[in-house]
Amino acid sequence: MDKKESYIEEKFGRLLAQVKDQSLVSKAKLVILDLMEHGNGGKGWDNLDMPFTLNMQFDALYTLAHHTYWVTKFALSIAQMFEEAMNIPINHDFIIIGGLLHDVGKLAETEKKENSFTRETEIFKQFRHPAYGAMVAKQHGLPDEICHIILAHAHEGDELFRSKEAQIIHRADFIYYGTLRSHLGLK
């Protein structure tokens, strides 16, 4: 296992171990590795210790890795409560893989320049991270249901019929983002 694979395992292994369909895990890891290798304006990333958003000042605690992990954990909790309250099944494999990949396209859309981060990449000039992440996931053989979660988690999904799992990831993502902004005193 190389350094980047070890990093993915360290950050997300506990969640990935819960996935029943291990072929989804293998494909998801390939998506992350692909974008770690080719992102950052072609320079690549060693880790996901970059801002999860450029819409607020970067704090080293609230990295893309932190955001991804906790959005997925929030989504799993929401799924479990929803199943208990409504007796409607939710695909937990899709929640975990979709949650872990929902912002993976940010690795391609974001570039580190000296000590700051920008969205000046060639990818960002053509695609926002939801679309690009979904395309890379599709290229690596992930099912349409997971590609849909990635694509629909942000505003790109506002005009779509979101699956149950996409709704949960979408809401968990905005709970994390919105609550953090409120905590920091931002609108």
Image (spheres, rainbow, N blue to C red):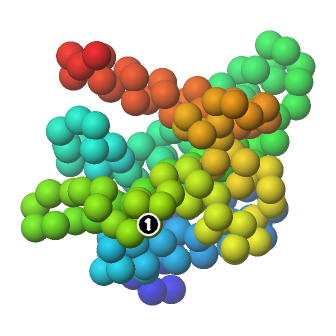
Instruction: Describe the element under mark 1 as helix, strand or loop.
Output: helix
Percent coordinates x, y for residue 71 in the rendering: 51, 38
Q: Residue at x 38, y 51 (%)?
A: 64
Task: Tell which of 152 and 92 is nearer to you.
Answer: 152
Position of the C terminus, as image quadrant, is top left
Q: Quadrant of residue 142?
A: bottom right
In the image, farthest residue toward the bottom = 2
Q: In this rendering, would 183 be left or right of 122?
A: left
Q: Is residue 87 above or below residue 100?
A: above
Q: How many marks?
A: 1
Q: Residue at x 33, y 60 (%)?
A: 110
In the image, farthest residue toward the left = 115
Q: Is residue 174 above or below residue 122?
A: above
Task: Tell which of 70 and 51 is nearer to you.
Answer: 51
Percent coordinates x, y for residue 104 in the rendering: 50, 58
Percent coordinates x, y for residue 65 in the rendering: 40, 53
Residue 29 visible to an observer of this rendering: no
Crowding around mark 1 (Cα neighbors within 10 Å: few <14, some 14 to 19, many 20+) is some
The residue where tag 1 is placed is 123
